[in-house]
Image: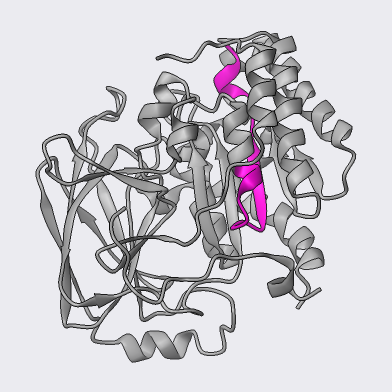
Amino acid sequence: MNRRDFIQRSPLLAAAGAVAARWSPVATRAAEEKALRAGPASSPAAPLMFQNAQLHNIDHLEPNPGGDGFRLNRMPRDVWSKLNAMGKTRAFAAAGAELRFNLVGPEARVFLRYVENRGGKAQGWPVLAELYQGGFLMRCVEFGETWTAIVIKKPSRLEKLVEETAGRGADGFDPALVRLALPYMPETQILRIEGDIAPPRAGQVPARSYLAYGSSITHGSYALRAGETYPAQVGRVLDVNVFNLGLGAAAYLEPEMAQWIAGRRDWDFATLELGVNLLRPITTQEFARRVHTFLATIVAAHPQRPIFVIDIFTSSKELEANPKRAEFRQVVRDAVAAVNSGHVRHLDGRSLFTKTTGLCFDLLHPSSDGFSEIASRLTAELQPVLRSVFRP
């Protein structure tokens, strides 16, 4: 099957567009059934644009109350309103979302700032945006809590970058395309873009896209930069777009989130990392109900798309001693088995992240080495399946 026929993609815009209560741990069945009856949320008609730049993995902009710039929300308003309190905060953390454009003039200036809302141990860490020409990392740029101009100029060796990617076909990014990847945390805000730029053209981005949902480990805590997260690393190896829907401390498997993912037609394969954020707030029985509902909703809408369901990653010996972790892992295995689909596979988080020496100081989140191990092992699991599904 031709992979372009297999997927349905929103066309890139040819011209610029305009800018566009705490959740209860145990939601009632009636509320979930009502959300499911409402049907899948609709996919965006086209990528979001801001002053001739495409905002990849951003659903909409929200003006700051004082009129000073815009907030970037990864979630639609109707989904965001149903998230738990932390999820509502983390939805505004960009998680590697990108500004994408072509330089027409000699340079452009993008004005960004961040709003500090990270945990105390991470506060003070540098906040870095990553500048790419296509798939080539050019530099990392630190910005602060006041508006900072990030100056982007045409690379002097662009023709060499083009030569390196000759024959890429539908894979990877066009080196002429500027990609400014935003930090996974804290919240990034945008003021304006100066300079003569044009939106991405058809064929400048990969033909396939990867969606990753999960906890702070999917979101990226405590990576040094967004490009270090495991979804970003997997995306680079596989030459695909990445939609990171990680929500640090907030992956609560809301039915509205499942319906939104189910209603999207812009992803070709997905990983769903389930469990760790719900160990404390709900029972194993409630978790089982949530997992079955969440997974069934997405699979019913995408019965042919590869979906990889990851249970709880490795953590410290003390945390692993909690018997609830084993129970939650078994719940995820059982839910995948119940789906009974050759396109849905269970992956044990401990087999993807095997070494506790790859943990960060909190003995829960991966370090740089840990993220690299997860990305490497996950890619090895994905590649043979994707080759069989997306045959040339």
The residue sitting at 59% across, 26% down in the picture is 254
The residue sitting at 76% across, 76% down in the picture is 2
- Tell me which corner region of the image, top left, top right, bottom left or bottom right, holds residue 167: bottom right
Of the 4 image quadrants, the one containing the C terminus is: bottom right
Residue 279 visible? The answer is: yes
> Of residues 100 and 34, which is closer to you in this image?
34
> Of residues 226 and 196, which is closer to you in this image?
196
Q: Is residue 221 left or right of residue 233?
A: left
Q: Position of residue 320 (x, y in %)?
A: 63, 17
Of the 4 image quadrants, the one containing the N terminus is: bottom right
Residue 353 visible? The answer is: no
Identify the coloring. Answer: one colour
Q: Position of residue 286 (x, y in %)?
A: 70, 12
Q: Is residue 306 left or right of residue 280?
A: right
Q: Position of residue 13 (x, y in %)?
A: 42, 71
> Of residues 75 and 107, which is closer to you in this image?
75
Q: Is residue 5 left or right of residue 249?
A: right
The residue sitting at 22% across, 45% down in the picture is 70
The residue sitting at 71% across, 26% down in the picture is 291
How many numbered dots are placed on residues in this image? 0
Q: Which residues are magenta?
A: 261-280
Rendered view: 344 above or below 214: below
Q: Position of residue 232 (x, y in %)?
A: 49, 54
Q: Is residue 277 magenta?
A: yes
